[in-house]
Image (spheres, rainbow, N blue to C red):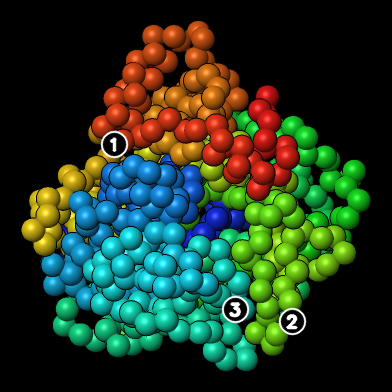
Amino acid sequence: MKNRPDRPNIVLILADDMGFSDIGCYGSEIATPHLDRMANQGVRFTQMYNCARCCPSRASLLTGLYPHQAGIGHMVQSLGTPPYQGYLNQNCVTIAEALKQGGYNTLMSGKWHVGGEYDPQRPEVLPPGADRAPIPIFRGFDRFYGTIAGAVSYYKPKALMKDDRAVEAEGENYYFTDVVTDQAVEMLDAYGHRPEPFFLYLAYTAPHWPLQAFPEDIAKYEGKYRQGWDRMRTDRHERLIEQGLLDRKWEISPRTPGVPAFSDVRHQDWEDLRMAVYAAQIDRMDQGVGRVLDKLRELDIEENTLVIFLSDNGGCAEFLAENGWTENFGGTTPDGRPVRVGNHPDLKPGPADTFMSYDMPWSNVSNTPFRFYKHWVHEGGISTPFIVRWPAMIQSSRIAHPPTHFIDIMATCLDAAGVAYPKEYQGRPVTPLEGESLVAAFTDETWARQAPIFWEHEGNCAVRQGPWKLVRENGRPWELYDIREDRTELNDLAEINRPRTEEMAAHHGEWAERVGVMAWKERWTEKLNEAIHPFLSKPSR
């Protein structure tokens, strides 16, 4: 192994609600030349897992712990116990806090969403920066620009902050993805020449709904999806196999029951346009990644800068049905027009006065070739692209197949930086790190994970141990899969291998008790299902 470079800069890039096969170097037809460039100069991992949902994934990514240990076992709403309090607790440290102690400058641009149920309409109730609404500046970051909320309009995002003060979206051509990139580049200009290394967390909201993009980006893709979702999934599956990311023996999962064939869809042009806007959002994000990579080169610091890219969950099947759940997402456009919320076929997605999602059939394309979606812990909900580029360390591109998880990112960053994980922080004890460093895996093809990986989200549970995965939907029996033979989870072995099923279920129970998982209450499930496409309110089999 090459001697490890000294104190690299670190850039951690996170996409939002983007599926496993949504970028070119992971089988997509969407143009992502800059992420593809990263892949061609680094390592692509095929089995990186997130936590199935934005808030828990971000909590895990930032702390190296399971989300329950960091206080965000579900989302930013408090469910009444410390593991589900909805904001980062005082017994975890963020990557920024740990690296700052090690002499790093710490920067963030983008989406926070780990700071409690802050309401921008009533800031006096829970002002940002309060104990229950921590903001990045109070969790180790020197600089911050972005939103402390979740889903926001790209043209008029809410809950914006710059460092520790509230700001508004400004400028005639304001588009959040571009401004997040602008701010990141400005931070690189300010800190890239300093003698201390920096950590930049670049957390896009793209391509999370709403479907909003520039006409010139949409035009690249309009008409491309008239072939329909089945054909797009098949084409992506074949490219994934050709690229060496998937084993051909893993059959593509079937279309979700209840989803029609594209030929039976009434509004085909509208469906094509919905996916075209989603693709345009990814395209624009990739353009931003390119600007960041170019800035590293311009500053002559790309050689010893570790750049990481991944997504917080799988493709999102949320429908945005007009049933009250979307009432918080209306408002007006920058020029005062009312925003029309919901998936209306008589409206074109894309402009600032619409607020749509791309729905289940297209999210099934995003998650090719896997089953299920964001919220669930089957492979479609938790599998993310994971690209690492570090020219001073990684001399040639390759594909790596060992299972990895968001809990590993903290350990990896600290290992690369030569910074120890603290046992206490500001006089408080710190929960021991759960993740394993992946630095050795960047160059060592024999690297293998030592510990099992666990999940729980909304009662959906899983454990991955070596090649075996035990998984279940909330309220349903355990399923067992041999991922070596069946990563698309089509051949359930739970009944014919009861000893392994019971052993792994016991391990999951021990983990759940250790981190504070509580039984998911049926009334919460019913409430959440009201917000999701009706097909998902019933078992899929």
- The residue drawn where x is 81% and y is 68% is 348
> Given contact means CB atoms under 8 Å apart, are the residues at marks 1 and 2 in contact?
no
Residue 498 visible in the current orientation:
yes
Query: Element type at marker 2?
Result: loop
Residue to which mark 2 is pinned: 337
Q: Say above or below: 502 vs 27.
A: above
Q: How crowded is mark 2: few (under 14 residues within 10 Å), some or many (20 or more)?
A: few
Residue 87 in the image, given as x and y percentages of width and height: 35, 56
Query: Element type at marker 3?
Result: loop
**Which is nearer the eye, 15 or 511?**
511
Residue 58 in the image, given as x and y percentages of width and height: 39, 55
Query: Element type at marker 1?
Result: helix
Amino acid type at image mark 1? Val
Residue to which mark 3 is pinned: 156
- The residue drawn where x is 37% and y is 71% is 128
Amino acid type at image mark 2? Arg
Amino acid type at image mark 3? Lys
Which residue occupies the extreme front position in the image? 125
Image-quadrant location for residue 32: bottom right
Residue to which mark 1 is pinned: 515
Q: How crowded is mark 3: few (under 14 residues within 10 Å), some or many (20 or more)?
A: many
Q: Say above or below: 359 vs 306.
A: above
- The residue drawn where x is 56% and y is 55% is 18
- Could you give the CA–CA distance between mark 1 and mark 2, rounded to whole angstroms? 47 Å
Residue 130 in the image, given as x and y percentages of width and height: 31, 67
Image-quadrant location for residue 68: top left
Which residue occupies the extreme bottom position in the image? 172
